[in-house]
Amino acid sequence: MPEIGFIGCGNMGGALVKAAANAGYSDSVYICDHFAEKTDALSKELGVHVSDSVTIAKECDFIFMGVKPQVIDKAFAEISDILENREDCVLVSMAAGVAIEKIAYKPLRNASPLAVLITAIGVSYFLQNVALLIFGSAARNFPDVLKVNDWHVAQGLTITGETIITIAATVIIMIALTTFINHTRIGAAMQAVSEDRGAAQLMGVNVNSTISVTFAIGSALAAIASLLLCSSYPLIGPYTGAMPGIKAFVAAVFGGIGSIPGAMIGGILLGVIENLSKAYISTQLSDAIVFGVLIIVLLVKPTGILGKAMREKV
């Protein structure tokens, strides 16, 4: 079982620690924070191990940076030399997602959903072009970090190691995230804010903090998704994530907005449809077919496969 380290256990890191522990990884989770009372409380509640940032950087396979953007430089300075000499670990930072939320989305708290959607598209293009300016347009090879043997099922039928890890990781994350949303206080706060922000605030929910935690978790999951994607398609560039990002939105709508299992089912069905389209119809039309299926689903069942109809407040 991989060892998972969390550097920083505030609202962001603490939420992910609880999700990992609830998924059955307590014995493999190591945590550290500037405030010892936080780590001691989490260790007592969840059975995770208290450690320090240097030990986590040396020994953990997956390292989550849950520190705030303003102190991330200091946190990295303590472990940068160790990480530079390691090729067998994955570093996940949530600071970028939280910073984007503070800068781009927090001013739009009372704006229309259309304004938020347009902002999301604008932020996506901004990040792509920043990556283009920093790293250039030339494609690069992604390092081989997922070293799992292929599974030879039968004559002529082989499942790659990357595919096995992707399916396993998807199921584990789905279970962990569903458990976290349905059985933790922060998860309940997320549901309350999504249902009725004003009512949640009247009940004492810190709306801004809850939304920041949501963006932090989303950033961490995006990092894991990019790792899985780039392991299967190791030639990467500034625009590698553009189309997969759009298809992820399609999968969420396909499966049902607000349903975590639905998003997973939607992603699997979308992948099956796309690959069948490439094999039996046309590789050039596969994307068009995927979006065509989305249109049909929205016409027949607008809430998606597992989505629930929402009553409009009057």
Image (cartoon, rainbow, N blue to C red):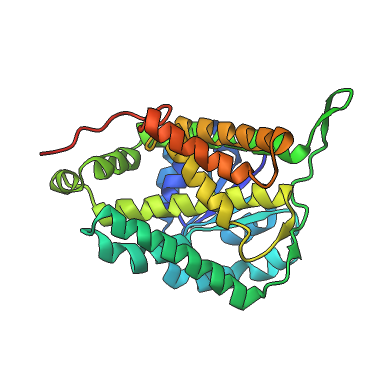
Residue 241 falls in which quadrant of the image? bottom right
Residue 233 lies left or right of residue 294; in this view the side is right
Residue at the (42%, 37%) spot, across then down: 45
Q: Nearer the viewer, residue 68 or 100?
A: 100
Residue 42 % position (x, y): 43, 44
Residue at the (51%, 35%) spot, across then down: 293
Residue 168 % position (x, y): 64, 33
Q: Quadrant of the N terminus?
A: top right
Residue 235 lies, with reference to residue 15, above or below; the image says below
Residue 254 % position (x, y): 46, 35
Residue 10 % position (x, y): 40, 55
Residue 120 lies left or right of residue 222; in this view the side is left
Residue at the (68%, 72%) spot, across then down: 137
Residue 37 visible in the picture: no
Q: Nearer the viewer, residue 314 or 146?
A: 314
Residue at the (36%, 33%) spot, across then down: 302
Residue 123 visible in the picture: yes
Most extreme residue toward the bottom is: 133
Most extreme residue toward the top is: 154
Q: Quadrant of the C terminus?
A: top left
